[in-house]
Image: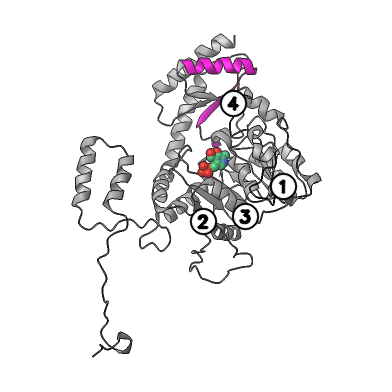
Amino acid sequence: MTAKLAIEGGNKTVDVIGPLPTKIGKDELLEVLDLWQMSDGNAAKIKAIIESEKNLKGPHLFRYYNPRPSKVAAAEKAMTELTGAKYCMATNSCTSALVAAYRSLGIGMGDEVIVPAYTFFATSATVAASNAIPIIVDVDDTLCLDARAVEKAITKRTKAIVPVHMRGAPAQMDAIMDVANKHGIPVVEDVAQAAGGSFKGRMLGSIGTIGCFSFDYYKIIVSGEGGFYTTNNERLYTRALNWHDCAACWRPDRFGPEKENEELFCGENYRMSELEGAVALAQIRKAKDIIAKHRAAKDKIKTAIEKFPGLGFRRLADEAGDTGICLIIFLPDVETTKKVLAALKAEGVPCGGIYDSKVRDWHTYNYWEHILQYKSVSPDKLPWSGVPKNELPKYTKDMCPKALDLLSKAILIDIEYNFSDEDCGKIATAINKVLSVYLK
Ligand SMILES: Cc1ncc(COP(=O)(O)O)c(C=O)c1O
């Protein structure tokens, strides 16, 4: 006789499944711990503790549908507190945050976006990857976008201006915002290199329309890979969320109805994982302290540098808003710069040149051949086919002479937040020693 079906009131055949093994368990935790490089003795003790654990539930590394409070969501909240921006969305990189920024603004084929001649390539590559045309504009002695050059570059196609707060210091945001507001053009701040910096009392990433941050390992606060998108505009935030996760899980129900026009469209997947979220959260909590230490170390070195004829410093648009991650000095000419750089390196000073016409580097526009030569990933020749040929920008390798001139005479001295007073003293002594020979 067949048993009565559960649907007809019979007993349920499968009432409990499990316990199921955790998807991610002890082996993975041990691999993660290995990254921290503990001493052998402590590593062995922790390994023994982990192996003795009987109730390991394992992490839920996906931010959505998470039975526990999401670390990514907590990191987003911490970023709104750090930056003062109303909304924040975590991404897997700043590159993806930039694409989300351009896409949420509706930027696409036939549009132009103004970017500086000096920035990491991602700022402009993402414009082209969004099917829009990067318009490369010169920098001023802040080494960030020159507001006057921006105004000259505006056309009927300009859909965004992207100041990049290079090397930890803010761009001249008052002048840039004046130009943007006068022409009604949104501003996307690229804060990849200046998280925690500010301009005249306002945190970077909350001044323009959108802010994009990088948490890759080489930035100020880091999670290995990662990024954040900040804005005060709810509509842009909603559109960015949609772009960053094509499954649209946030509405709060992923199948919820469209809240407003233009909210739903096909996006990609730029989600941050809970592992990066956890690291980012801990780092954001420490950001103010890290920056205060950077600034203090920079101040010690800078004030100990003597006056030398021909020595200049990068102009800071707002010294109080500088994150202090580096000190940039200018020398009178390229030849002296090369000699001073070699001598500083020989003294053990952590430093580097910024631009050398013979050394490839992704931070200066004249090496962006993909853009200068109108390269495309597909036969449709986008983004360049998006505008009439005679309206394409005429890119040349020397189109931004100020950037090339300033950068070729600049030396960047790295500042670490954990430099001791002694480290700062030694670095300043070495700089004075070298400059007293070359800048007599
Ligand atoms: C100015 C700038 N923008 C964007 C990026 C891209 O950041 P990510 O590596 O997080 O994609 C970087 C990274 O070097 C950068 O320096």
- The amino acid type of the residue labelled 2 equals Asn
Q: Nearer the viewer, residue 23 or 157?
A: 23
The tag on residue 103 is 3
The tag on residue 269 is 2
- The amino acid type of the residue labelled 3 equals Arg
For marks 2 and 1, give the one nearer the viewer: 1
Which residue in the structure is indicated by mark 1? 384
Q: Give the range drawn in magenta.
A: 321-346
Q: How crowded is mark 1: few (under 14 residues within 10 Å), some or many (20 or more)?
A: many
In this rendering, position of residue 313 left or right of residue 402: left
For marks 1 and 3, give the one nearer the viewer: 1
- Tell me if label 1 and label 3 are in contact, CB under 8 Å: no
Residue 11 in which image quadrant: bottom left
- The amino acid type of the residue labelled 4 equals Val
Find numbered disc 2 in the image and state the secondary structure of the residue it sits on.
loop
Which residue in the structure is indicated by mark 4? 359
- Tell me if label 2 and label 1 are in contact, CB under 8 Å: no
- The amino acid type of the residue labelled 1 equals Trp
Note whether residue 307 is visible. no
Q: Which of 119 and 361 is in front in this view?
A: 361
- Please provide percent x and percent y for residue 162: 64, 44
- Please provide percent x and percent y for residue 294: 46, 32
